[in-house]
Amino acid sequence: MNYQLTDEQTMLLDSLRAFLDEQVYPYEAEADRAGEVPEELGNQIKAKAIEMGFYAANLPESVGGGGLDYTTMGLVERELGKASYGLAGHIARPTELLLACEGNQINNYLTPCVTGEKHEAFALTEPGAGSDIMSMTTKAVKDGDDYIIDGYKHFISTPCLPDFAIVFAITGIDETSRGPRKRITAFLVDRGEKGFDISLGPLCVSQRAYRTYQLSFDNCRVSKDQILGEEGNGLDLANKWLSMGRVWVGAQSCGKMERLLKMATEWAATREQFGKPIGHFQGTSFKLANMATELQASDLLVMHACKKADQGSMTPDDAAMAKLFASEALGRAADDTVQIFGGMGLMEELPVERLWRDARIERIWDGTSEIQRHIIARSLLRPFET
């Protein structure tokens, strides 16, 4: 990275690197093979993260969080991105959507997530509604002072079984100048609520230890007091979370790219063929040059978005550009690293094949590359619309 860090940021990142070296990296291969993080290990990482002040570092000090600004959080997410999400996810960064909690919701949901007593799930995606949020079919029908939720969510990824879910559901239809539009509302739904079933989803080839869950709702009754924010503003809440989430994906992609570049460079400098290190051959050295260049460009895009977020001026296309470029650059870096390692790059003996697999999901979750391009293009064309 070629931008200047403050002394405080340098100290924070040094401490975080030491934490990951001790608490996370030694267990990555084991967790990947098992397809899960043992509960005891997850609790160990969480307890140490709380002790070190890394837990909930993204939330304001006013609610008990670490109070880090977006730029510093971008650096933190970059470092965490080098590690397995299944393990690093226990260093929780609760969703900022919880800042919309009011009244009893603060004590029941926000505060326990800050202290590590509870863990939330962001339940938006459905089998027929991935990037196209408005295609969701989960409904919440008003019944007196309650709402009856019926529907299904999948690909809900968290490092452990969540204590509650932020569930997005249709609560009505609004007539707009462009025709009928679904009104979407966010609900806080506790695990164990009657009619709410949660089960493990299929094992993903990327981030195997970072499990996905399937949530089903069958006549699940919740009070109107379980609405997060206001009725009908769920889409605004979701979009706010998704924009910063995309920047964090970009930052994490940069971290993983740096880890791959370091491994590829060391291998190219020491692996000999035809009497000299393979890094002396242009077929290898040019790959390293491309990786280093795209890493720096990705870092600058991510930091640009973070600084604009701190200024309150970040736009959806800023976030989309950061995620699009960094995640696709990571994909190229992961593939080139495997190629540089040759056959060893595909063997479980080394972490290269795992990082290669893990890199693939970055171009899909939090909005596919195609969706990011759509957001960027729409921003360019909007001034010409009448």
Image: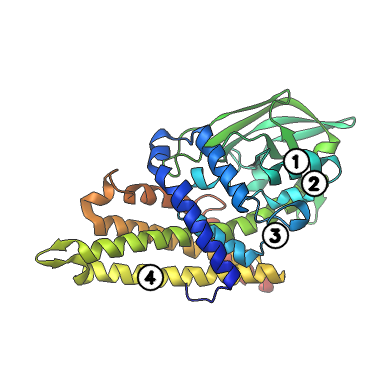
Colouring scheme applied when the structure was drawn: rainbow
Q: Residue furthest front?
A: 51
Mark 1 lies on residue: 109
Of the two numbered discs 4 and 3 on the same chain, state the one appearing first in sequence. 3
Q: In the rendered structure, which amino acid carries the disc numbered 3?
A: Gly
Between disc 4 and disc 3, the foreground one is 3
Q: Residue at x 70, y 46 (%)?
A: 114
Q: Residue furthest right?
A: 144
Mark 4 lies on residue: 292
The quadrant in which the C terminus is found is bottom right
- Residue 41 in the figure: left or right of residue 98: left
Camera-side residue of 234 and 111: 111
Q: In the rendered structure, which amino acid carries the disc numbered 4?
A: Ala
Mark 3 lies on residue: 67
Dot 3 crowding, Cα within 10 Å, few <14, some 14–19, many 20+: some
Q: Position of residue 120 (x, y in %)?
A: 66, 40
> From mark 2 to mark 1, how far is it between C-alphas?
8 Å
Q: Tally the marks.
A: 4
> From mark 1 to mark 4, how far is it between C-alphas?
42 Å
Asked if the residues shown at circle 4 and circle 3 are in contact, with their CB atoms under 8 angstroms apart, the answer is no
Q: Position of residue 328 (x, y in %)?
A: 44, 60
Camera-side residue of 201 and 125: 201
Q: Residue at x 61, y 65 (%)?
A: 72
> From mark 4 to mark 2, how far is it between C-alphas?
43 Å
Q: Position of residue 242 (x, y in %)?
A: 64, 54
Asked if the residues shown at circle 1 and circle 4 are in contact, with their CB atoms under 8 angstroms apart, the answer is no
Q: In the rendered structure, which amino acid carries the disc numbered 1?
A: Tyr
